Amino acid sequence: MGNKKVRGNGEGSYFKVGNKWRYQVTLGKDTEGKLIRVSAVSDTKAKAKAAVDRKIKEREKGLLPDKENLTVHDIIKMQIEDDYSSNIIRDNTYRRRMDTLKRIDAEGLGGLLVKNVDETHLKRFFQNFTGYSNSVIDKTYDALNKCFKYCSGRKHRIIEYNPLEDFVKPKSSRKDRKVTAFTVDEELRFIEILNGEEQNNRYRYQMLLMLYTGMRMGEINALSIRDINFTFKTINIHRTITKDRHDKPILNDQPKTDAGNRTIKMTNEAFNLLQDYINNHYKENSEQLLFYDFRKKSYITTNQVNASFKRLVERYEVIPGKKALTSLSVKRKRPAFKKYTFYKKQDGFFKAMAKEPRDWNTKWQQYYFYKFIPEKDFSQHMMRHTFATRAIEAGISPKVLQHILGHSDISITLDTYTDVFDRFENEQLDLINNYMKSLPDKNKVDNTPCAVGVQ
């Protein structure tokens, strides 16, 4: 016979399990849509219910039941959810921390019981992480350190000590990426393309506005027509397009940082660009956004603009580079097949595929494509860096640039553009040195004797 189910005054459900009773309460759903259930089994219904009530109280206090069987994943996931529900972190940070947890799970550490993790596990784990960037390593280390601190704290005592306490964090084998910007020639070439061959590009105005103002793309896509003031030539920045924890685009009323709330002056180029767009291309929409995706009836995301930007840079070779046949194994997922785009290696030669091979779905990693390898890294964010670089070259002060870019601290501006500031400083010093060299010629003393009575 199956288990008997009895309703308990609307508070939960009782199940008859052999000679015992199981009491179960559904508390709701987690972020993945799965039901959150708390249950307990005991000799009587009253004891089972009392056990469930204790578990719920422990949950509300932040205490976790069954500490002996908690995994690294359990603790980190709980900390992420607690910070999110307490409004300590926002959607972007939630997604980044969940991505970090996925990497920890993928390398096998997430499934280990917290009490069983030792320095050997951590050494082996981080040895597999040296191929990631220092930023990824830092985020992973911080997540694990927070987990073990929680577990070794006086309140919980799941473990006796933090195994990361004396652990030396490894460094990435990758070279740190430097901030890249267009050279003057590359910038002029890119603007020429947008005003010429690509004047009908869907994201032309956003790209040019980024070049002319240094705004983040999420901020540009969140502008409303009310944020543009042609009388005072200002742009009011107070929102951004971002993604929620489910990776869906949303209009966030809060910018990336508190300093992101700002009003900036338009350059002449930005003023003319926005007047042209509003007079000739702007369309009313339900969100009253300056830029809106009418095809999808949704917000325009940074990723959409970034994909278009990359295609333009490659297609018109704005940044010098070369193309090299590369295995499709470098891609994370199988791309759609296109004639003569993919190649098969046979006897040392590469043959372009005129039709989709039979094993495309299962062995696509064995095929090749021409990958563009640029002389320097690029993404749409380099348009923001290009604006900042031109501003520094023009002599703008770091404090003013900090405000325009919306950096929360002057050190971010100085650290991000240290190479540009250093180069600019050296150029200015050269001007001073050249001027000082010319002074002796301008101030030569005339030793000719003066006439009597002439001073």
Image (tube, rainbow, N blue to C red):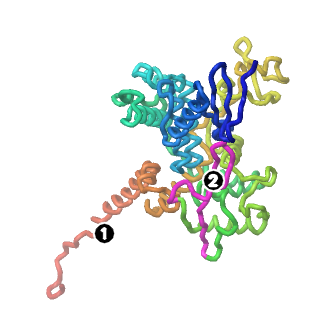
Please identify the quarter of the rendering in which residue 225 is found: bottom right
Label located before the other in sequence (2 or 1): 2
Q: Is residue 29 above or below residue 281?
A: above
Mark 1 neighbour class, 10 Å CA radius: few under 14, some 14 to 19, many 20 or more: few
Outermost residue, right direction?
A: 355
Q: Which residue has dot 1 on it? A: 442
> How far from the left and from the top, in percent, is residue 364?
74, 21
Q: Secondary structure at mark 1?
A: helix
Quarter placement of the N terminus? top right
Query: Residue 175 bears which disc, if any?
Result: none
Residues at marks 2 and 1 touching, judged by CB atoms closer than 8 Å? no
Query: Residue 218 bears which disc, if any?
Result: 2
Q: Is residue 149 above or below residue 328?
A: below
Name the side, left or right, on which 230 lies relative to 125: right
Please identify the quarter of the rendering in which residue 291 is found: bottom right
Quarter placement of the C terminus? bottom left
Name the side, left or right, on which 357 lies relative to 325: right
| Spatial CA span between label 2 and label 1 | 55 Å
For badge 2, the amino acid type reads Gly
> How far from the left and from the top, in percent, is residue 413?
45, 54
State the extent of the magenta-drawn residues as a range.
232-259
Please name whichever residue, 192 or 32, is drawn nearer the observer in this view of the structure.
32
